[in-house]
Image (spheres, rainbow, N blue to C red):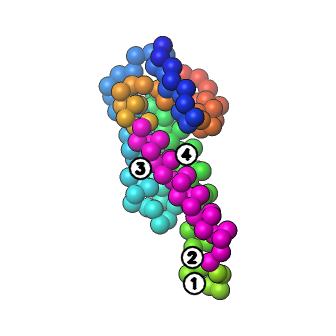
Amino acid sequence: MEHHKGFIIHKTQFAYHVGEHEAEKASNSYLMSLIAVIAGLPLPIINLIASCIFYFANRKSTWFVRWHCTQALLSQFSLLFINSCAFWWTISILFSTETLTNNYIAYLITAIIFNVAEFIATIYTAIQTRKGIHVEWWFYGNLTHLICKTEV
């Protein structure tokens, strides 16, 4: 079993041989979230809705697929909160008496860094998952284990 422990991810070979179809479906959960982020960037809820649809479509699938759909969905929840705050703060600056402040700029920079890091981690995870390698993200991996407790 190969282990690579990093700051963001934990990569291992999966407990059983992951089939080609399984690896493709699991990888698609991350690719779908990338497409949703690109298409729905101004409206953060679109990303979450797209991930929810993909999650519910695959919730009866194999454990490997369900696990990765769940991890992708959980990451979208974080993005929803961060991006929604940035979106509405920007709208209030553009269309109300709210002014541009250092706090807003700092939050926007933080939100951009978080989005870029999530984007890079998602691409990496989609590639590794497509190869049948199980990738657990820091924080999201532990939550996903709590939700997907047993293999079917």
Q: Which segment did they paint magenta?
A: 100-124
Dominant secondary-structure state across the stretch colored magenta? helix
Amino acid type, mark 1 = Phe
Residue at position x 40%, y 42% from top? 123
Question: Splitting the image into 4 quarters, where does residue 38 fall?
Answer: bottom left
Residue 54 occupies which quadrant of the picture? top left
Which of the numbered marks, if any, corresponds to residue 75?
4
In this image, 46 relative to 27: left or right?
A: right
Secondary structure at badge 2 equals: helix
Mark 2 to mark 1 CA distance (whole Å): 6 Å
**Is residue 48 at least partly visible in the picture?**
no
Q: Earlier in the sequence, mark 4 or mark 2?
A: 4
Residue at 36% of width from left, 31% of height from top? 130
Q: Residue furthest bottom?
A: 97
Q: Earlier in the sequence, mark 1 or mark 3?
A: 3
How far across and how far down the image is residue 147, in percent? Answer: 62, 33
Can you give x and y, in whole percent of width and height, for residue 85 in the image? Answer: 62, 64
Element marked by disc 4: helix
Image label count: 4
